Amino acid sequence: MSVIKVVVALGGNALQESGKPATAEEQLQVVNKTAEYLAEMSIKGYEMAVVHGNGPQVGRILLASETAAGVTPVMPFDVCGAMSQGYIGYHIQQGLREALRKRGRNIPVVTLVTQVVVDKDDPGFKNPTKPIGAFYTEEEAKRLQAEKGYVMKEDAGRGWRRVVPSPMPKKIVELSAVKTLWDTTIVITAGGGGIPVIENEDGSLTGIAAVIDKDLAAERLAEDINADILMILTEVERVSINYKKPDQKDLSLLTSAEAEQYIREGHFAPGSMLPKIQAAVSFVKANPGRKAIITSLYKAVDALEGNAGTTIIF
């Protein structure tokens, strides 16, 4: 059997349990459980790279930095993103190494601090939508807007927050390193969607305050690495239409045309299931004959074998 290459995008619940304290110790416990499922995929012969989100974590890093502003300089947002890649990657690396070791597999696991090029003219920059960091009063928000040039928006009655753009990923800077490592190593890459950078005319790179959607970054990686499967892991076992309504229908198979029709009909929530469906559709349209799978972490192995999850095909 030829080797099947999978890019796995981990959802927030693979890193942190809702309702539990957001400590490093709690996160490591959750990651250790996640690693068991990833190790099972490896044991069954799938080759993989792992992409993860970083929304809550990067917000906390920024908050810590801002809170200590009187003592030490505040780190810019792209640097906070890099820090989140490092510590989340370290947790996954440690957990997955141990889960593989218990199964008699000695496969190196490495985290690659990954930059992702975005277009400086991306429409996302004109309309920042991704809330990050702390909540502020309206007065504090206006002061930050004036002093630092932040875009501040009222967030669902809970206070004001900084919002940053969410541009589309164009190019993974460290792609050649991922390709070099692929045959021998499980690579954790494009964490949090990658550190967004602008490519300057002279070829140099400059970090920018933005958050790339991690599912779209995983799709970019899957295309560029020539993966057989893009696997997006989330909290639900299957994609549904009429979600949480009396006529909810769970889907086990979905064509790209059906998915696009459901998007037009407004079945998928922005910031939640919508980017996952968009990523899956992009992947199968670019690679007819390959597939994307959306399922829960706990059903990942079953879904790869066709017994769970939602499979999206061209």
Image (tube, grey):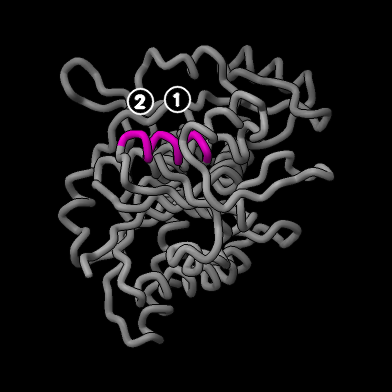
Please, is residue 125 above or below residue 307 in the view? above
Q: Would residue 48 appear left or right of 215 to someone viewing this image? A: left
User: Residue 22, how many percent across, how many down?
Assistant: 66, 57
Q: CA distance from mark 1 to mark 2?
A: 6 Å
Q: Which mark is residue 26?
A: none
Task: State how many labels appear.
Answer: 2
Query: Which residue matches tag 2?
Result: 118
As for residue 8 lying within the magenta part, the answer is no
User: Residue 149, how many percent across, how many down?
Assistant: 56, 15
Dot placed on the residue nearer the N-terminal end, 1 or 2? 2
- Give the residue drawn at x 39%, y 44%: 218
Please tell me whether mark 1 sits on a helix, a strand or a loop.
loop
- Give the residue drawn at x 56%, y 15%: 127
Q: Would residue 89 appear left or right of 298 to someone viewing this image? A: left
Q: Which mark is residue 167?
A: 1
Estimate how packed mark 1 is, as few (under 14), some (14 to 19) or many (20 or more) residues with alpha carbons within 10 Å: many
Q: Is residue 16 visible?
A: yes
Please tell me whether mark 2 sits on a helix, a strand or a loop.
strand
Q: Would residue 68 appear left or right of 185 to someone viewing this image? A: right
